[in-house]
Image (cartoon, helix red, strand yellow):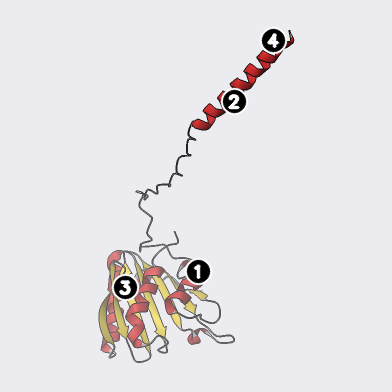
Amino acid sequence: MRGNKFVVALGVGVLLVVSTACSAAVPQTQAPPPQIPRITPSTTPSRVPVMVDRALPDDCELVVPVEVMNTTLGQELPGEPRIIVGIKEPGIGRTGKIDCYYGIPDKKGLTDAKIVIGLSSYTDDLTARTRVSESVEAERADGAKITEVDVGKQKGTLVEGKDEQLLIGSLGKSTFVVRNRNNFIPKEKLIAILPVLAAQSMTPPV
């Protein structure tokens, strides 16, 4: 009986040796290389803000936000913007008006603003265009330089007077005007800055 036990034990040992040798002879399977994620460009078009014949806002942050104003100008304006709500004038077809004054120093008044942006609404498209044309012709008669410029996909008129330059235009029943007070923006930068502010004023927040 002892001999039988010895043989069995030996047999198990041999089996273990053979099994180990076989497992050592089988090559290890390498892990697959890490997968590189594939980025597929989105086919959904991004929403791009565009100028519209908008309802009159009740806050200057909805006209041109202070951050956008400062970024466009390349400097930080003093003070907080102030809004003045105008009255309706049925005699000229005006149904609403607002003016936003930017860059008013502390303890100063509206006349010290650096930039003024005005929006008005009228009874119809023709009345709005007529008001713009009349304003431009009045400035031309006063000796201002008149230039047509692009405002987004629209057209506007740059009016360069002695002490003030403005960009004016209409879109549907609405009109917009951006005024550069006291030559705050250098004349060589007017076309680079005023159209941007004008387009923003007619673009509702996304």
Structural distance between the alpha carbons of marks 4 and 1:
98 Å
* Pair 4/2: label in front: 4
Structural distance between the alpha carbons of marks 3 and 2:
94 Å
SS type, badge 1: helix
- Tag 3 residue: 169
How busy is the neighbourhood of tag 2: few (under 14 within 10 Å), some, or many (20 plus)? few
- Residue 130: image quadrant is bottom left
Structural distance between the alpha carbons of marks 3 and 4:
111 Å
Checking the image for residue 61, the label placed there is: 1
Structural distance between the alpha carbons of marks 3 and 1:
21 Å
Q: Earlier in the sequence, mark 4 or mark 1?
A: 4
How busy is the neighbourhood of tag 4: few (under 14 within 10 Å), some, or many (20 plus)? few
User: The residue under label 3 is which amino acid type?
Assistant: Gly
- Tag 2 residue: 17
User: The residue under label 2 is which amino acid type?
Assistant: Val
* Pair 4/1: label in front: 4
Which of the image's four quarters has the C terminus?
bottom left
Q: Earlier in the sequence, mark 4 or mark 2?
A: 4
From the viewer's perspective, is 178 left or right of 25?
A: left
Q: Is residue 170 visible?
A: yes
Residue 105 location (% of width, % of height):
55, 85
SS type, badge 3: strand
Q: Residue at (30%, 80%) from the top-left corner? A: 158
- Tag 4 residue: 4
